[in-house]
Amino acid sequence: MQVSTGWLKDFLKIDCTTEELAEKFTMSGNPVENIIKAGAGLEKVVTGRVEEITPHENSDHMFVCQMNVGAAELLQIVTGAQNVHEGDIVPVALVGANLPCGKKISKGKLRGVVSNGMLCSRNELNIEGDSSGIYILPKDTPVGVPFAQVAGLNDDILEFELTANRGDCFSVFGLVREAGVLLNQTPKFPEIKVSEDAGQSSKDLIEIKIDAQDLCSRFSARVLTDVKLAPSPEWMQKRLEGAGIRAINNVVDVTNFVMVELGQPLHAYDYEKIAGKVLNARRAVAGEQLHTLDDSNRLAKGGELVIADAEKAAGLAGVMGGFETEITENTKTVVLEAASFNSASIRRTSRAVGLHSEASGRFERGVNEKATVTALDRAAQLLQEMGACKVCEGVVDVYPAPKSEIKIQFTCKQINDRLGTSYTEKEILDVLKSLGFKISEVDAEFDGEEVIDKISYAAKHLGKAAKELAQNSEVDDFIQSIGKTVGELMKRGGAESFTTYEAVVPDWRNDVTLPDDLSEEVARIYGYDKIPATLPKGSQQGGQSKLQNFTDSIKNILSSLGMNEEVSFAFTHPDMFDKLQIPAESELRRAVPIMNPLTDEYPLLRTTLLSSILENAARNFSRKNEDVRLFEVAPIFIPKSLPITEQPFEIQKLVGLIMGRRAPKGWTQDNAEVDFYDMKGIVEELLERLEIFNYTVEAGEHYALHPGKTAIFKKGREILATVGEVHPAVAENLGINKKVFVFESDVETLMKCTAKKFNFENLPKYPAISRDLAILVNLDTAAGEVEKVIKKSAGKFFKEVTLFDVYTGERIDAAKKSLAFNIKFQSNERTLTDEEADAAFKEILAAVEKTFDAKLR
Amino acid sequence: MESKIAELKAAAADSIKAAADLKELDNLRVKFLGKKGEVTNLLRGMSQLSAEERPKIGKIVNEARADIENLIAAKNSELKAKALQNKLASEKIDVTLAGRKFQRGHLHPLTLTLNRIKEIFIQMGYSIEEGPEVETDYYNFEALNLPKNHPARDTQDSFYITEEILLRTQTSPVQARTMQKHKDNAPIRMISPGRVYRRDDFDSSHSPAFTQVEGLVIDKGITFGSLIGTLDFFCKQMFGESTKIRLRPSFFPFVEPGVEVDVSCPICHGNGGGCKVCHDSGWLEILGAGEVHPKVLEMSGYDSSKVSGFAWGCGVERIAMIKYGIDDLRYFFENDMRFLNQF
């Protein structure tokens, strides 16, 4: 919605600046998004009279003018124009002007003579007309006033970004009503009165029907005869231009003018083209042909509201008129339609057709169905005033279920309580009345509780006694009279009373139905800055759930381990499943599909976080960020069934990835790259800090990982984490030409496996004894298995075992590897003897020899 | 004898003085004071002296011995100090070289921002509530007074899974779910952070997914003033004590009255001067808020005549962009290491 200030000024006296007016609108709920300033660039152009003109002493074609621009002293300006004479009134650009033509005016000398401005031509001011010399203004033009004012360029344009609830403000009258309240004025609206021409009657000429009463609540029509199509008058064209609507001809312009003025869209039909002289608001039949006024043939889906004549649909109601019944230069008789269509239906149709018009926008927000006839009258009046038609008698008006008035009962206390304010009754009622609400007092019925409230409120120290009184009372009349009396007393005492009022909502406001809505009216007019700020009283226990705290811990631990948190979209693509080598039969391919994805790029919800983190790694790699350390905690989406019938499972997963240098580049650090054991170390550290102990690690398999470099962390049956090197083929599919290591984990599983209590261990009183065990085993023997056997066979003094060397190479058999363990023994009761340690060591050696065919080195 | 002692003393003093290092000094100690040293020799020669002379000479010899010992000790300290000095001089390094770097990690700026928001509200007794990202149309819209074909749905163009299931466009469904978990008009103070989805192109100011946090308070006597006070406190905590808020009336179907909330620009403090963040307007729109619509309360089992509430919502990206001066929304989701490493 846009409107010129000039149009508003037809009804109101506006003394403030356009910016101030826009601020008032915005701060009371009708936001002005933009102001288009009238005469932009003419701010420093004023009217001036040539008091004296003399030839320039150093030029044969220039003149020196002494200009009266309304200031105490005359202004000297040099001009090269030849059409200026003493006494002429002309536009004068003062120093500092920045003209529409691009010229910037500064103080200067022209051939040695001081010039303090410029006399302007029409062209320089962007004014249409003869531009051969300086623009000579009429003799009666006032001197020293802004030129823009003289030229009638004082209409700024307000562009509104109206909220969905204020359909009434989609009109000049609506905005004027608001502005009237904001400026404390009563607007003077024009009298809408049509003098009908005797003779024909509308109802004899046209029949109106509503078959789809749920989609069209009212359909009113008027018939105009002897129509003379012509351009509309200049004033109307100017108003329409200000509203952003192109002038076409008087009939179309008047329908548009009335729509903008009153907010009621109108449609004009060529009466001669209406088959059967009947217009019916009905549902389209599926497959029905619609020839719309953009000359395109549309096929109805079925169910759209159309206006049809006896033969076919003549237009999509409220969205687009029909081609055949359009007004042409041959039109002689016009049927004007003013109707109220169901907003949801219009919205659906206009979206389906992809057409959003001034009319459909208004219907979507809802029009005032009480005012259809007024709109017809206004249009007929305007056309008649232009001498463009004769007006038939009467209106054909089909209004099967007239809307009843909306009445809201409220008390001022209710409003103040909601807002946290202490407006007086008068303040509250004044605002509502000024907005068009009709207010009356209601003889409200009190209930006992309400009366208690009133008494307590009125006299807190008497509250207890009053409560007893009211509770014991068996006589309703008594309660009624107490309620009334106390309310009356309070009112007289100047306090906020408990009088119940009834507000009749003005018919143009379809957004106000509850007392809560009334509180908004009060608040927005007085201003939200007037409401005292408080904090909710009392206290409550807040905080996070255990899972939320656990998730935060994971993030904090991983970031302390040099990992960077990523945030990625939950979307993915089937191609990604191929790239990740997810097997064809895998559950992970059964992803949740999006019905209306943004692009073909992301039609699914992810089933693994690997797709996200690898995409991020690939993006970094392509940007030459080759040292990447990422992690993310986020949900994956697993359907309960396909096709989707209910919400999918959302499972919180954790994923991490490293590639590139082990340590940041620096003179102290080499360029070694991360390997499997860096990733595994991070996972081990994470588990330790989450207090997850006593897990096992074994070689495993994973679709996207290197078959020889995949480890599975398990605790009982639960899989804590899968760690590995990304399969080189997967990395290549993603365009990463580097080794990438990842881990995957499930957040709730991790939480389930944390130690239930902290195990504090006393410091040992007696020293430990340690023994080193270096053995040769087959290459494929897992060190983890050897460790398990050591622990099992080490006896009661075993404390810990650390693998400190792994060797393969020339010094030993090529089919073997050497593992060196340091094993510690300790007792809490005494210092162990060497013999005890040796005995335990022997047991261990025997066990590993037996289990792994190990040889002591 | 006495002259012999004096000579010896002088000779010792000279050679101690000339000693170049600790080893040489030690040799001198042996030479003069050792078991076969010269002072010992002198004492041995005492036997030939008379009984009257013996104590006198003995005393002189002992004094000489003490003097030499002192000289050696002094020289020893001097040489040790010198040696340490030399050692320190030889150990000099280039202290301007960079220190050994740590492999540091970083939380995402959205997490950092959200953590701060959570802190602020947890200290006011709010709980942190979460809910599913794939929601039903009922919880996402209808329970919030947004029936089907409500024009306000247009501003939240949604990704649908089925006609009735969609990616949530706001975290408000968590409010409805939380309200329904409570009974007997029980008071609520909660915030609901989380990912939300709207069918917007991905550009510098739009994204098909972003992060929202919403707040809800329900209790007896909750007024619009409580909302203003709460938001004022939040914005001051978030952007600094001098921050002001401004409320502009607006329309959201789930609140009445509804407002949009601006904060005074924490970058230029309304002083303009070509502020890139607020474009010299001095204000930044960051929140939508209002008193909970009675229909919303009723739909989730609260009695709107007994309790009232307020709700607000804001984009975490928006807050983070203001706080860190980030001007492109895409940075948050591209996860470029050069971006992540800055926080």
Image (cartoon, helix red, strand yellow):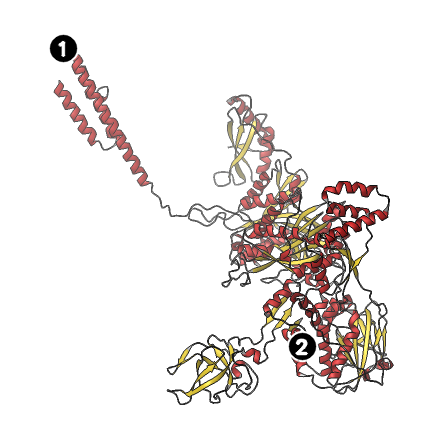
Q: Residues within 10 Å of mark 2 (few under 14, many from 20)?
A: some
Residue type beneath disc 1: Ser
Residue type beneath disc 2: Ile
Q: Which x, y percent locates residue A486?
A: 77, 49
Badge nearest the viewer, 1 or 2: 2
Which is more toward the observer, A170 or B169? A170
Could you tell me if residue B304 is visible in this image?
no
Find residue A493 and name its label: none
Compared with A350, A226 (above or below) is below
Compared with B98, A111 (above or below) is below
Judged left or right of residue B73, residue A198 is: right
What distance separates the C-alpha of mark 1 from that of mark 2?
142 Å
Q: Which x, y percent locates residue B311?
A: 68, 53
Q: Quadrant of residue A379?
A: bottom right
Identify the secondary structure beneath mark 2: loop
Q: Which x, y percent locates residue A342?
A: 79, 67
Question: Chain for mark 1?
Answer: B
- The residue at which mark 2 appears reads as A245
Identify the secondary structure beneath mark 1: loop
Judged left or right of residue B131, residue A271 is: right
